[in-house]
């Protein structure tokens, strides 16, 4: 892989507190890369370090094969971004804001580009209104327009769907896919919603307590070959015995009151169900969750209690 | 009061008073000499040395017409004595209007002068007492000290040159009592003023010197020249 | 740098707050001119009453030069506050509104962005002074005519020839620009340290007011402090109307003002180029 973004041992410490702790990361060219993690996990700090808004305490960051510290301006000229939320000069119109940032980013044929991005994000017709009259969704669209204005190779979007209505979220998703598929852009996307990442990302990283705890291809990490299945039965002990007798005992994770917890592939579920029914064990319910999703739900629900090692 | 001044001056101020020519005759001669000039104009340069006031020398035109019209025209701001330079001569024009007492002899500008005290008969005028230092040979007033009702004491010294025959001085120097200038900082909005600045005396004397040149005599100057305004 | 400077000027020009200073100056100058038009002679009579016991003062005292001088010394006290209103918001305003994230992810160094902000503020300060000069001198000469300048001091009057005043006013405006640049860089420095838009403005104003009070109070303890306060040297513009001119003191104060500008700018750059943008 020829990484477009590479972080090696990057940490950011505030006194004794490590907001980001020894982060190693690689983003390949032309992919949509998801940053996943609960609030406060260190996603935003990591993205800000990539954008040179925050200086790492240790480690190195390189983009496009260039060291960020040494080639900051050249690198930033190839990046478009929305960080946290799209804030603009409220006393200026959307058009003036785009002109202003377009000039700063050395956008060629600025007026034509502004027309293009306004159409792309669906803001045409409102560009001359002052930004202070915009809804959050419109500001988000303006943010996207600004991020795309100078035709960057890498687009970094920090929680871009926040505040968008369902239609807006679908449009955003389609836009990101258009950027990747049709324009060959690399997109880094942060979110605390797994399904959002799953739908559009090629690769992802889960960040927890400043560390990259899981990293890889989405198709592999969120595979249906690795499910956690809760089988609610009338007699869990009998069910456990039946599975052992049928050489399926290796699927059992644990026995809990009223249920068995299994770790298996999606294709194993009908066989398990048939076996238990044949043994006269009543099945009240089958609930399948993917292991990663289960882990992520746990750290999202209670980040303090979740143990990083629990997933591994 | 006036009688007392006259008596005191006669008794103690001028021991030789009764041995000298009548002072009024001398004064009359001085005035007659000046009366030959009906009007004049001249160039004047004014130099100021007034406590608390910094004013660089100013040049302008000066105009006079008998009996009492006087005007200095300049482009800028000037400080002048409240009395014009010919106030003394105007005050002694009518020899019946005052008492003149010889008060001895003194040397002024290396010239021996006769000192004459002049006390107006009338209390209504501005002048209370004038002391004149007169050069008897040239019939010129070299110095005068005027005590006025409203403006305190004013000393006027005059130096003569080419036009001494017409009693027109080359220069006149006024010496005036000046009260200390002081306004509240807030009025002057003077934030830079420091209490460490040396404190000035409550009173002082200021001098204004007029240096004349380019006299032009008896040109029948119009009264309009003396009108206020430009 | 040119692009960044134009952008910063554009932002200042489109921000309604930027016009408060111009409006305030216009109103105050016109009020002073109106007041002097109606009552200026009484004001002068009050000031000159001690001297007019002994002298008659001849000439047009209440002229455009005097009016401009009075306006200048009245407004110079207020102008730092107007400058702080803009300079105190330069960086912290961007932080408070969130635009600093966008600004600092553009392909320009932080130093060049701060330079652009500093130069834009300097141009704003220059225009503010230019506007003051135009209104004061233009309005003054239009309403009151020309004439020698009577420089009012609490214990002294200096009368300067009309022909000798214009260059002094220009020099005084130049020194006032230097003084206000100190305020601008001081506010800019505070602005770099906070993400709150109002804080640096209030803090700048508070410091200037405090230093001015210390400079005005005649307490022996403060006399030792005064030479170290930049506000002490900010009023050196007035020395341009002294006769004779104390060039030594004027240049010393100007150097001290330049030193303060360099110091405040240095601290601003040091902090801004290293600052983490967390909001």
Image: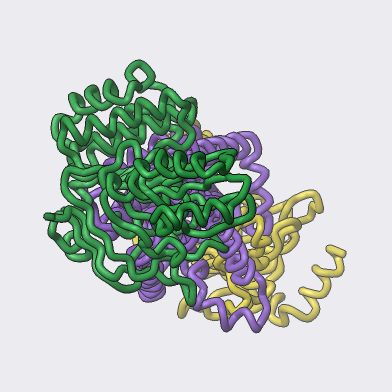
Chain colours: A green, B yellow, C purple
Residue ID at (56%, 36%): C27
Measured as percent of width and height from the top left, residue B65 is found at 49, 41
Front one among C118 and B7: C118
Q: Quadrant of residue B114?
A: bottom right
Front one among C237 and C98: C98
Front one among C237 and A247: A247
Measured as percent of width and height from the top left, residue B215 is found at 36, 50
Residue ID at (25%, 63%): A7
Measured as percent of width and height from the top left, residue A209 is found at 46, 64
The N terminus of chain B sits in image quarter = bottom right
Count every numbered label the image shows and give the total.
Answer: 0
Does residue A94 appear left or right of residue B30 in this picture? left
Q: Quadrant of residue C37?
A: top right
* Up-down relation of residue A231 to residue A165 (above or below): below
Whether residue A204 is visible? yes
Measured as percent of width and height from the top left, residue C206 is found at 60, 61
* Up-down relation of residue A110 to residue B119 (above or below): above
Residue ID at (46%, 53%): A243
């Amino acid at each position: 892989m020829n990484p477009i973004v590479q972080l090696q041992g990057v940490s950011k410490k505030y006194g004794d507190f490590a907001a980001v702790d020894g982060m190693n990361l690689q983003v390949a060219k032309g992919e949509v890369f998801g940053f996943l993690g609960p609030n406060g996990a260190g996603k935003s700090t990591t993205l800000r370090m990539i954008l040179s808004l925050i200086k790492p305490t240790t480690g190195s960051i390189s983009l496009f094969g260039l060291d960020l510290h040494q080639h900051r301006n050249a690198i930033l000229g190839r990046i478009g971004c929305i960080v946290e939320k799209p804030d603009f000069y409220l006393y200026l119109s959307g058009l003036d804001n785009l002109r202003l940032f377009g000039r700063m980013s050395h956008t060629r044929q600025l007026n034509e580009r502004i027309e293009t991005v306004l159409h792309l994000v669906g803001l045409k017709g409102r560009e001359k209104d002052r930004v202070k009259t915009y809804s959050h969704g419109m500001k988000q669209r303006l943010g996207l327009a600004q991020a795309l204005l100078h035709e960057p190779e890498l687009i970094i979007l920090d929680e871009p769907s926040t505040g968008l209505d369902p239609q807006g979220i679908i449009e955003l998703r389609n836009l990101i896919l258009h950027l990747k598929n049709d324009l060959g852009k690399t997109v880094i996307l942060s979110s605390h919603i797994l399904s959002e990442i799953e739908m559009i990302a090629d690769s992802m990283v889960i960040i927890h307590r400043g560390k990259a705890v899981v990293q890889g291809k989405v198709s592999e990490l969120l595979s249906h070959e690795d499910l956690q299945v809760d089988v609610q039965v009338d007699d869990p002990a009998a069910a456990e015995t039946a599975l052992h007798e049928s050489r399926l005992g290796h699927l059992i994770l644990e026995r809990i009151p009223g249920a068995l917890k299994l770790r298996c592939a999606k294709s194993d579920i009908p066989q398990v169900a048939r076996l238990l029914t044949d043994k006269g064990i009543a099945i009240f319910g089958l609930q399948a969750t993917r292991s990663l999703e289960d882990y992520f739900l746990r750290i999202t629900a209670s980040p303090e209690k979740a143990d990083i090692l629990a997933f591994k | 009061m006036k009688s007392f001044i006259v008596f005191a001056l006669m008794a103690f101020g001028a021991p030789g008073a009764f041995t000298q020519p009548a002072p009024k005759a001398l004064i009359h001669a001085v005035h007659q000499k000046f009366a030959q000039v009906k009007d004049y104009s001249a160039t004047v340069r004014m130099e100021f040395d007034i406590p608390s006031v910094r004013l660089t020398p100013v040049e302008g035109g000066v105009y006079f017409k008998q009996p009492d019209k006087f005007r200095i025209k300049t482009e800028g701001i000037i400080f002048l004595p409240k009395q014009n330079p010919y106030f003394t001569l105007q005050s002694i024009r009518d020899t019946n209007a005052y008492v003149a007492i010889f008060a001895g002899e003194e040397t002024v500008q290396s010239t021996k002068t006769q000192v004459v005290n002049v006390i107006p008969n009338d209390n209504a005028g501005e002048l209370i007492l004038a002391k004149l230092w007169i050069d008897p040979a040239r019939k010129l007033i070299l110095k005068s000290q005027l005590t006025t009702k409203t403006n305190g004491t004013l000393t006027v010294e005059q130096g003569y040159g080419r036009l001494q025959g017409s009693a027109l001085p080359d220069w006149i120097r006024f010496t005036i009592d000046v009260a200390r200038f002081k306004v509240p900082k807030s009025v002057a909005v003077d934030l830079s003023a420091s209490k460490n600045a040396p404190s000035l005396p409550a009173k002082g004397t200021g001098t204004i010197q007029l240096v004349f040149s380019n006299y032009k005599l008896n040109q029948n100057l119009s009264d309009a020249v003396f009108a206020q305004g430009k | 740098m040119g692009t960044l400077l134009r952008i910063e000027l554009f932002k200042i020009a489109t921000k309604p707050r930027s016009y408060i200073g111009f409006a305030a100056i216009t109103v105050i100058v016109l009020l002073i001119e109106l007041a002097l038009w109606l009552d200026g002679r009484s004001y002068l009579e009050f000031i000159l009453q001690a001297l007019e016991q002994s002298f008659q003062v001849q000439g047009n005292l209440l002229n455009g030069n005097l009016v401009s001088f009075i306006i200048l010394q009245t407004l110079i006290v207020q102008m730092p506050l107007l400058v702080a209103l803009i300079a105190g918001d330069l960086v912290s305003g961007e932080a408070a509104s969130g635009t600093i994230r966008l600004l600092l992810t553009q392909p320009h160094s932080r130093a060049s962005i701060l330079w652009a902000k500093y130069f834009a503020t300097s141009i704003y300060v220059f225009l503010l002074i230019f506007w003051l000069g135009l209104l004061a001198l233009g309005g003054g000469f239009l309403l009151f005519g020309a004439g020698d300048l009577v420089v009012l001091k609490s214990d002294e009057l200096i009368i300067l020839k009309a022909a000798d005043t214009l260059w002094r006013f220009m020099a005084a405006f130049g020194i006032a620009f230097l003084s206000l640049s100190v305020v601008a860089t001081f506010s800019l420095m505070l602005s770099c340290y906070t993400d709150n838009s109002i804080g640096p403005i209030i803090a700048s104003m508070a410091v200037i007011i405090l230093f001015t009070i210390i400079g005005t109070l005649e307490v022996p303890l403060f006399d030792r402090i005064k030479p170290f306060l930049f506000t002490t040297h900010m009023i050196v513009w007035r020395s341009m109307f002294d006769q004779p001119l104390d060039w030594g003191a004027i240049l010393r104060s100007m150097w001290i003002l330049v030193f303060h500008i360099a110091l405040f700018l240095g601290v601003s750059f040091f902090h801004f180029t290293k600052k983490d943008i967390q909001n």
